[in-house]
Amino acid sequence: MRVTGALLARYAEVEAEGGLLNVTGGGVDVFGVRELPVHFPMPFALQLRFQENEAEQTHEISLVIRDPQLRQIGERTAFEIKPTLGEYHAEGWEGIFAVAGTVGLYAEVAGAHSIGIQIDDAERGDIPFRVVLADD
Amino acid sequence: MTERNIQPQELSTGRDNHLVVMLDLRTGHSRVLLDPAAMRPATEAVRRAHEQAGVRVLMGPAA
């Protein structure tokens, strides 16, 4: 299973019928804050691709935040998914699983951070973002 | 597509290959939203949280 798309956005949702992702303002990654540490939610979207032999099994997706020194801050946050092969699945092709929602971001210092994305304990992608102190 | 009974466990790990979640990377808390439409009111909560925390989205890709 691999991450083929991951981003923060002003808004993100998954359509109930069909599972398509709707994203507005995707790719935001610089946040101005008045003080540190700071803790705030942001919408996000993930697109995952999985092999046929990974379907009908439960997989753990976990996210961690790393600070400018690549140290983990906050807590590892996990949830489970169970992908399936849909009725239009073509034999030999990968399936697609979409995740949308909000992620609570946390920063203790200004600078470049990243959200590490792990699938079944293996690092599979990341979403970088920057935090800057902005008075106005 | 034929109708079928959806088991509660199936909803918590995604139905038809999609899932909506609310995560907090500071506390490690995660919650599955069983109704994808619940994302829309959640964005108002995001806006209020940004206002309270003094957060502004400054720009897009910083590279």
Image (cartoon, coloured by chain):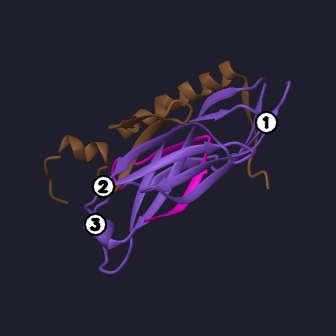
Q: Judging from the image, what secondary structure is the residue with disc 2 in?
A: loop
Residue, disc 3: A85
Up-down relation of residue A124 to residue B57 (above or below): below
Q: Which comes sooner in the sequence, label 1 or label 2? A: 2
Q: Which chain is purple?
A: A
Residue A103 highlighted magenta (yes or no): no
Residue, disc 1: A110
Q: Type of residue at label 1?
A: Ala
Residue, disc 2: A58
Q: Residues within 10 Å of mark 3 (few under 14, many from 20)?
A: many
Do pointers 1 and 2 mark residues of a single chain? yes
> Residue under mark 2: which chain is it in?
A
Q: Which comes sooner in the sequence, label 3 or label 2? A: 2
Which residue extends farthest right? A135
The one of B24 and B44 positioned closer to us in this rendering: B24
Q: Type of residue at label 2?
A: Thr
Disc number lying in front (3 or 2): 2
Residue A12 highlighted magenta (yes or no): yes
> Residue under mark 3: which chain is it in?
A
Magenta stretch in the rendered image: A1-18
Q: CA distance from mark 1 to mark 2?
A: 37 Å
Query: Residue B34 falls in which quadrant of the image?
Result: top left
Q: Residues within 10 Å of mark 2 (few under 14, many from 20)?
A: few
> Residue under mark 1: which chain is it in?
A
The one of A94 and A118 positioned closer to us in this rendering: A118
**Left-right relation of A59 to A64:** left
Q: Judging from the image, what secondary structure is the residue with disc 1 in?
A: loop
Query: Residue B47 falls in which quadrant of the image?
Result: top right
Q: CA distance from mark 1 to mark 3?
A: 43 Å
**Left-right relation of B28 to A71:** left
Most prominent secondary structure in the magenta stretch?
Answer: strand
